[in-house]
Image (cartoon, grey):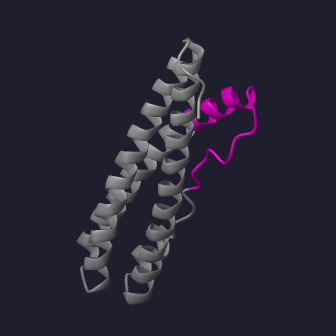
Amino acid sequence: MQADRLINLCDDILGHITEAQRYLSSARNWGLLDIFGGGALVTMIKHRKVDNCHAHLDAANGMLQRLGNELKQVGPVGQLYIDAGDFAYFADYFFDGFFADLYFQNKIGELRRQVDQTYDHVVKVREALTKARRYASGASAPS
């Protein structure tokens, strides 16, 4: 059944987004340490966390694109893409000071909000698919 396949795809997307959120939380924590004088090692760890987040977002975006294409056949879909942005790695490494660290920390927060919104959107899509599957299998009409 197509609904089952799409629900499983939503679950896979949510798994990648959850991992991205975990890495962003860790990057945010390392970023706070970096703002208050963490140094080059802390900057490197923070960037590693953001890179790991990007890997999960790339995987989620590929799946989101597939999900969006399949759902377009049913009706309009909201944004199903996470724009990870530039993140200004160079400035954070090169200038490695309070203002560069603060700017990078702000970028982490912006990405986190976007990731959280996409997570919520996928949860709603998954809930709608689950209701549609129940309805198609003979259960009472969706409310």
| Front-lying residue, 4 or 105 | 4
Measuring 50% from the left and 50% from the top, which residue is drawn there? Answer: 120
**Residue 70 lies within the magenta run:** yes
Residue at image coords 28%, 74%:
40
**Quadrant of the image containing the C terminus:** top right
* In this view, 36 is above or below 90: below
| Residue 95 can be seen in this image | no
42 left or right, relative to 55: left
Residue 68 in sight from this viewpoint: yes
Q: Which residues are magenta?
A: 63-83
Q: Residue 46 falls in which quadrant of the image?
A: bottom left
Residue 35 image point, x, y percent: 32, 83
| Of 119 and 143, the residue lying toward us | 143
Q: Nearer the viewer, residue 125 or 39?
A: 125
Q: Residue at x 50, y 26 (%)?
A: 7
For the N terminus, the quadrant is top right
The residue closer to the viewer here, 43 or 104, is 104
Residue drawn 75% across and 26% down?
73
In the image, residue 45 above or below residue 142: below
Counting from the top left corner in percent of width and height, residue 63 is at 55, 33
Number of numbered markers: 0
Whole-percent x, y for residue 8 in the image: 46, 25
Residue 43 falls inside the magenta stretch = no
Image position of 122 with respect to 20: above or below? above
Q: Give coordinates of residue 53: x percent, y percent.
A: 40, 52
